[in-house]
Amino acid sequence: MKILLLSITLLFSSCIDLSGRQNKAHIVNSMANTLEKQHPDTPFVKPEDLNSDDVLVDVRNSNERLISILPNAISKDDFLAKFNEFKEQRIIAYDTIGQRSIPWVNELKQQGLKAFSLRGGVLAWAHHGGDFVDITNQKTKRVHVFSEAWDMLPNGFEAITQ
């Protein structure tokens, strides 16, 4: 059922003119709403509600992270290697839209951690006006979006899918 709802959302989005920022932002928000409904026990945090002391964990694969990450984010592996350092902090996991971060957030919650999924992932972050940095910690507008179907970035960004 989850896959069906997500597929319908993607099919619907393919029928809309995605050239406008408003349409893309609306589609990202609709997909985030769908994920929230599918995962009512998962806590989410909106991009505008992030705090400077949050631990940002990018759960995307290394090829995706090599293109860009949110400033100060760490990989899931780095988080796990320093797990004890973060036990008392609010943990915000993210990926492209939330599909991969949600199960991991639920695992962390079961361990008693204050874990949340970034609502809408990197797509919502970009629409919120958030920055991205490359591996040299320089600002970039290049963002790996997993596949062409997920290229819902605002104008001015370059979607990477390879």
Image (tube, rainbow, N blue to C red):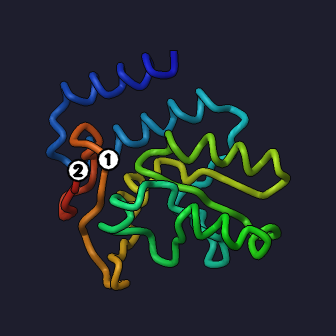
Image-based side of 43 in relation to 56, left or right: right
Instruction: Give the residue displayed 43% in from the left and 16% down from the top.
Output: 4
Residue 138, relative to residue 153: is it above or below? below
Q: Which residue is mark 1?
A: 146
* Between 28 and 113, the one nearer to me in the picture: 113
Corner quadrant of residue 83: bottom right
Q: Label 1 near label 2: C-beta < 8 Å?
A: yes
Q: Which residue is mark 2?
A: 161
As helix, strand or loop, the secondary structure at mark 1 comes to loop
Residue 101, relative to residue 69: is it above or below? above
Does label 2 or label 1 sit earlier along the sequence? 1
User: Which circle marks residue 158 in the picture?
Assistant: none
As helix, strand or loop, the secondary structure at mark 2 comes to loop
Decide: few, some or many residues near mark 2? Use Cα within 10 Å; few <14, some 14-19, many ≥20: some
Give how far across and how far down residue 55 sits, in percent: 64, 70
Decide: few, some or many residues near mark 1? Use Cα within 10 Å; few <14, some 14-19, many ≥20: some
Image-based side of 125 in relation to 148, left or right: right
Corner quadrant of residue 144: bottom left
Q: Amino acid at mark 2?
A: Thr
Instruction: Give the residue displayed 45% in from the left and 21% down from the top.
Output: 3
Task: Spot the residue most to the right.
Answer: 112
Give how far across and how far down residue 108 sits, in percent: 74, 51
* Between 95 and 45, the one nearer to me in the picture: 95
- Mark 2 vs mark 1, CA separation in Å: 5 Å
Q: Amino acid at mark 1?
A: Phe
Instruction: Give the residue displayed 68% in from the left and 32% down from the top.
Output: 40
Instruction: Give the residue displayed 51% in from the left and 35% down from the top.
Output: 33
Give how far across and how far down residue 31 sits, in percent: 43, 35
Give how far across and how far down residue 109 sits, in percent: 77, 48
Image-based side of 92 in relation to 146, left or right: right
Residue 96, relative to residue 62: is it above or below? above
